[in-house]
Image (spheres, rainbow, N blue to C red):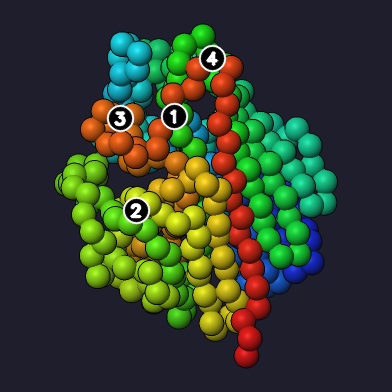
Amino acid sequence: MTDLVSLRAGDLALDLAPKVGGVVAGFRHGATDILRPMPAEAIARGLVRQSSCYPLTPYSNRIAHGRFAVDGQTHQLTLNFGDHPHSIHGNGWQRIWQVEAASETNATLTLDHVPFGFGPAGWDGWPFAFRAVQRFSLTPEAMKISMAIENRDTRPMPAGLGWHPYFKAHEGATLAFSADDVWRNGPDSLPEERVAIPPAWDYSAPRLLGEPNLDNCFNGWTGAAEMRFPNEGLSVRMEAGPDVRHLVVYIPTGRGFFAVEPVTNMNDAVNRMDAVADHGLRILQPGEQMAITMSIAVTILAR
């Protein structure tokens, strides 16, 4: 379970752990971690949620109680997040990915999912067959990733994509991004009310992370976010392609990291397609694909 694929370009280093959910296990500039490093023990034990970044496929965030209906058929998923009452982040992060190709600066990982294991608790994973592909490219300036998913089932399949990067919370780090509005969550961690962005959550200008304990989905994201690590002398810019207009921001208290997650769909989108016009989920017909991109560029701050 510990095989790594390591890419190098200039001062940038990118490590991938295909057998542990197709995750990024480290991304750094010289000796400075841009994403939090995945501990060796976590890699060995397959603890995906301690990774640097993991793929979100075939949906992002939560599906309420793991239950949804598509094309007149109701589906029940097993709950895949401990004692959490909802299924979360799809099943790509809990599967072994295959290395299709790898070089010093590029790698391609694939995942072929065939439904299996329907039992008393529901489908163990996802009730539709699909193929997912992640392509990684490293230059001296940036890490670039694309991810595609193809519906290989005989039925229409709901699909959403994204990534869950955990940035290292260096002392003095700032965050900046712009969006139209945000969902407030209810006590069940599901979207409850769409509101204007409160001042405490407004990162339209660079500001310190603070401790707002954010874990919310922003709508109408512009597709760019900038992190600055002044003590390390680095600026980090994350950009996503035009189909990625939701951003989940997770800033926990005292954890040493923060997550800025570019995703195509709002939380629990599959159960809100009739109520929310810009939910962001796609219904893929058999053989149809969708794809997204993300880049994380690193530049040295002027002194």
Task: Tell me the crowding category of disc 3: few under 14, some 14 to 19, or many 20 or more residues within 10 angstroms, Cα based.
Answer: some
Q: Residue 127: percent from the left, percent from the top? A: 44, 17
How far is the residue under mark 4 from the one under mark 1? 13 Å
What amino acid does circle 1 point to?
A: Arg
Q: What element carries label 4?
A: loop
Q: Name the residue under label 1.
A: 282
Using residue 205 as the reference point, say whether residue 150 is left or right of it.
right
Q: Which residue is drawn at 55% across and 60% down?
A: 238
Sequence-wise first label, 3 or 4: 3
Instruction: Measure the alpha-carbon separation of dots 3 and 4.
Output: 20 Å
Give the Cα distance between marks 1 and 2.
18 Å
- Residue 141 in sight here: yes
Residue at the location (35% across, 22% down)? 77
For label 4, count other residues whose C-alpha is less than 10 Å away and answer few (under 14), some (14-19) or many (20+): some
Kindly state the secondary structure of the residue where label 2 is placed: strand
- Label 4–label 1 contact, CB within 8 A: no
Quadrant (top left, top right, bottom left, bottom right) of the C terminus: bottom right
- Badge 3 is on which residue? 273
Instruction: Residue under label 4, please give it.
Output: 286
* Residue 2 seen in the current view: no
